[in-house]
Image (cartoon, rainbow, N blue to C red):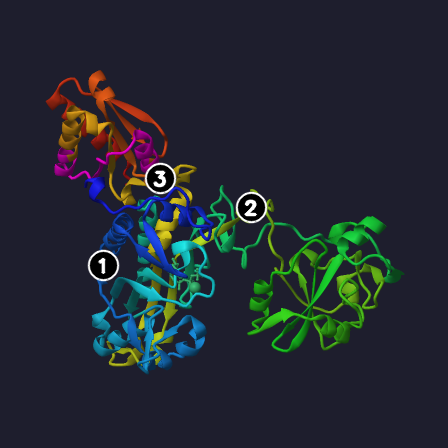
Amino acid sequence: MYQSKLFTPTLKEAPSEAQIPSHILMLRAGLVRQLGAGIFSFLPLGYRIVKKVMGIIRTEMDRIGGQEFHLPALNPIEIWEQTGRVEAMGDVMFHIKNRDGLVLAPTHEEIMTYHARQHVKSYRDMPQIWYQIQTKFRNEPRPKSGVLRGRQFTMKDSYSLDNSWEALDTSYDKHAEAYREIYKKSGLKFFVVGASSGSMGGSDSQEFMVESSFGEDTCAICDISGYAANIEVATSALQPIGRIQSDDLPSKFATPHAKTINDLVDQFCFDKNRCAKSVIYIADSKPYLILMRGNDELNEAKFQHFIGAIQCRAADPDELLHITGAHAGSIGPIGISSTCTIYADNLLKDANGLICGANEDGYHYSSLDLLRDTNVHAYADFRVVHAGEPCINGNNPLRIVNAIEVGHIFKLGTRYSQALGATFVDEQGKDHPIIMGSYGIGVERIIACAIEQNHDDKGIMWPLSIAPYHVHLLGLGLHKSAEAVKACSDIHTMLENSGIECLFDDRDISPGIKFNDADLIGITFQLIVGDKGLNQRQLELKIRATGERILIPISEEYGGLTNILTTIQKQIIHNTIQ
Ligand code: ATP
Ligand code: MG
């Protein structure tokens, strides 16, 4: 491809609304243009990358027996009403204004299940894996990170249909393996979080994450054991503080200037771990007091999940006063209303010698013994894990990282097949709902994550597998050297004929601009051809990611071309992820 003919509008600076590297670089390299909030047009160079990623996905989906569909984005709302998801999706779903009864699909569980209901009738008709790579519409409230969060985006979504829970496990495991291959082949470093008990409960789910400071998820990971968990469920091997030798009874003392645990520690020299912090939560309209170590933070998701509440929030100051008789900073379990259920974090299990609020402003108790003085309903892991805590698999320190979700696999079970009446007949002639799984990958997210992980201050450094072209041929001084023009055009033709995708920068502009554009666009290999190299009978192949320069001798014309081809072929093999 001649770059002079390619529409690739590179920019020196990205518009100020682009804040993260992938967004900035996709705009600057001329891969995308923004049409509206969360709406992007892919330009020719960008769309080549999209097609490469889709190609990798197709190969791996076909490998596990997937069959490709293409479903409409325009959906009858009544199918979505049958599963209760019009309400559940709320404002995320786009509704069509001038045609009643149509919505834009944010995902396709309903539609696939609809087709399954039409035609999958017998246990013999399964297993099936149905997939598509298609446009999804979601009215995301804050689309601010470029194509990472679009209101219109491309998803590979697939759905497994099985006649037993064991068969669902197999379909799910096949997807997990396919996803690993897809990310690996796209050159992404990723980790997997989520519960996968392998049980038959039908609710396992795993998320595939890419570490990035711009990710909206927070995860705890251990680089040595491979442990990885979303912060909402992450735990550590930190041990309970245990009991100390003391029979002292609780005694109230004045703490007029201590509003926080740090104040208590500073003013009275208490052990921070034994300053028990109490927080009050309202879950499904009932009050709860949760005790934790002074320096710990309640993980609301863990607490809500543990008590199985639908709604859960911190009590407001008026409620605190009403329930405890005190303001925040002076709250504790002794003498608390019996309507308030007490829970405590595992690290305080059966602890004594604790300091706690006295439910009276400006007072605390010393020598609280949880076994003796309180009625703790249950102990559980309620705290937020912190960086450096020991991993539960081997005690190595955990890292807390931000991450971007690039994929999600989920055992749906019979939720959709039941709601839509998609049943099959078993060997005994008995009806059952089809057992389903749902699996999604964001195509643009793979691209943006690849940039987040592979860029420097000059631009993108594409992994070969998803690079828009394999080789960027930079022809220097072409306007004044017929020899350089001929060499470039021969090399270009030879590479293309050998199946190596070549973008030939034949533009009549300065070498400096060519080098800058090439580094910005980030094609894996740059082949530099100009009079200087031709005279010295050696050309330079630069590896964009490492900056390494390989000199290719070109002693005479025919041998020269062969040398170039074999050197590039060798580099392609070397850079191909198996
Ligand atoms: P998030 O929590 O980031 O909103 P999600 O849980 O809504 O993601 P799923 O419904 O599981 O995502 O969709 C499957 C995949 O589609 C995600 O893993 C992600 O890669 C991609 N995806 C989801 N929403 C968007 C979006 N708004 N823009 C681009 N890709 C998206
Ligand atoms: Mg979402």
Disc 2 crowd, CA 10 A, few/some/many (<14, 14-19, 20+): many
- On the image, the x and y values in percent for residue 425 come to 25, 78
**Discs 2, 1 touching: Cβ within 8 Å:** no
Q: What secondary structure is found at the residue carrying circle 3? A: helix
Q: How much space separates mark 2 and mark 3, taking CA atoms?
A: 35 Å
Residue ID for mark 2: 398
Residue ID for mark 3: 520
**Discs 3, 1 touching: Cβ within 8 Å:** no
Label 2 vs 3, first from the N-terminus: 2
- On the image, the x and y values in percent for residue 366 come to 84, 58
Disc 1 crowd, CA 10 A, few/some/many (<14, 14-19, 20+): some
Residue 173 shows up from this direction: no
Whether 463 is drawn above or below 556: the answer is: below
Foreground: 405 or 274?
A: 405
Residue ID for mark 1: 65
Residue 434 vs residue 264: left or right? Answer: left
Q: In which quarter of the image is the C terminus?
A: top left
Q: What secondary structure is found at the residue carrying circle 2? A: loop
Question: What's the residue type where badge 3 is placed?
Answer: Leu
Which residues lie in the magenta part?
Answer: 493-518
